[in-house]
Amino acid sequence: MPRSPGRLFRTALSATALVAAVGGLFQPAQTAQAEGPATPPHDRNLQRQLDELVGTGDGPPGVIALLTRDGRTEVYRAGIGDIESGRPPRADDHMRIASVSKAYSGAVALQLVDRGDLRLDETIGERLPRLPEAWHRVTLRQLLQHTSGLPDFSANPEFREILGNDPHHRFDSRRLLDFIADEPLLFRPGSRYQYSNSDNIAVALMAEDATGRRYEDLLRQLVYRPLHLRRTSLPQGYRLPEPFLHGYDVTPPAPPDDVSELFGASGSWASGGIVATPADLGAFIRGYGGHALISDRTREQQLTFLDGGASEPAGPGANAAGLAIFRYTTRCGVLYGHTGNFPGYTQLAATTPDGRRSLTFTLNTQVSKSNKPALLAKVRAIQENFACALLRH
């Protein structure tokens, strides 16, 4: 079936995604298989929930979840990672991690705070005076916590028109905020919470200005290398490295439409453009949410939470917003992490506060409150059950 960007533009953009995809797909589940001799035995109840999820009428073609405890990983998977070949999802598949990318920009910015290159109360006006004067009082802290009031560039009609006409359009990532340069702030900075893709574009620009280095280079230096992330990148184009988890637009009764490479990453950049594998994603969130990257003093600031500030889509349990990280308070305990959704992908990455245990949970279709609210509720319930398994054992 030919790709259909118009189909993806029928609903409004969510706060994290460039486009909202709608629909569902029934796919037979595949039995989970251990990856490596050290993989612990599977929890049959968790596996059953994944099997049922891919069998839901508007469910994903496939799902893969990694539970890591003290260096040992259980890999749960069901359904299809590539409809054409029929193979299941794999822990070494590249995939779009969507707005989980915002945690990476947080990892860069907070390390620069540790080094004295940036301050949490430093303003856009001090670092980026070329941006509209109305924005100049917005601080780095407010950008990281989504209390800035910046309008979301990805909801701008001109941006959406360009992307709708040419999904492969190559944007100048460092000029994405130009789409909203004539718009006022939505509210007084710091007065309330509103998730915005614009925030993390500004964070990356502040990091570049503070160091004189490209954001991509800062990611390699401050995130990839310390955490040994060898299969993580921030591309500009639309191609994905092989092998990759194929992402699908699922709109019954039409067959699933492969949108893995329909959109380029230049239009999301620091807000949602990173590509990683499930294994690398788990290593990142353990390092970032634990104690590997950020000093205790800065971490204390990072973990000052606003209750009710949810990631997009919401993660399991009760959500609260910190600085480029969210707290998920489940019935079994607390995890720190981030979620994201993008055409073809829905992501959760979460860790225990000590960084010793992690959960990654990936669907290869987009699920959000705007396109599939009932399915999102089901996904969140399953994610909470996985979180409980992680925390209990």
Image (cartoon, helix red, strand yellow):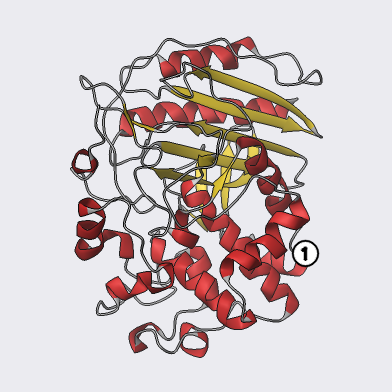
Could you say where residue 172 lies in the image, as x and y percent from the top left? 39, 69
Question: Relative to 259, does residue 16 appear above or below in the rendering?
Answer: below
User: Which residue: 49% across, 24% down?
Assistant: 81
Location of the C terminus (image quadrant): top right
184 relative to 365 in the view: left or right: left
Q: Looking at the picture, which amino acid does disc 1 mark?
A: Asp
Residue for badge 1: 296
User: Which residue: 64% across, 80% down?
Assistant: 211
Quadrant of residue 130 in the image?
A: bottom left
Could you say where residue 126 lies in the image, as x and y percent from the top left? 51, 89
- Residue 191 appears anywhere in the view: yes
Q: Nearer the viewer, residue 265 or 292?
A: 265
Could you say where residue 309 lies in the image, as x and y percent from the top left? 46, 54
374 relative to 270 in the view: left or right: left
Quadrant of residue 350 in the image?
A: top right
Q: How many marks?
A: 1
Disc 1 secondary structure class: helix
Q: Nearer the viewer, residue 375 or 129?
A: 129
195 relative to 305 in the view: left or right: left
Mark 1, residues whose alpha carbon is within 10 Å: few (<14), some, or many (≥20)? Answer: few
Question: Relative to 305, does residue 251 appear above or below in the rendering?
Answer: above
- Residue 291 appears anywhere in the view: no
Question: Relative to 270, does residue 12 appear above or below in the rendering?
Answer: above
Could you say where residue 26 lies in the image, as x and y percent from the top left? 34, 15
User: Which residue: 81% across, 34% down?
Assistant: 71
Location of the N terminus (image quadrant): top left
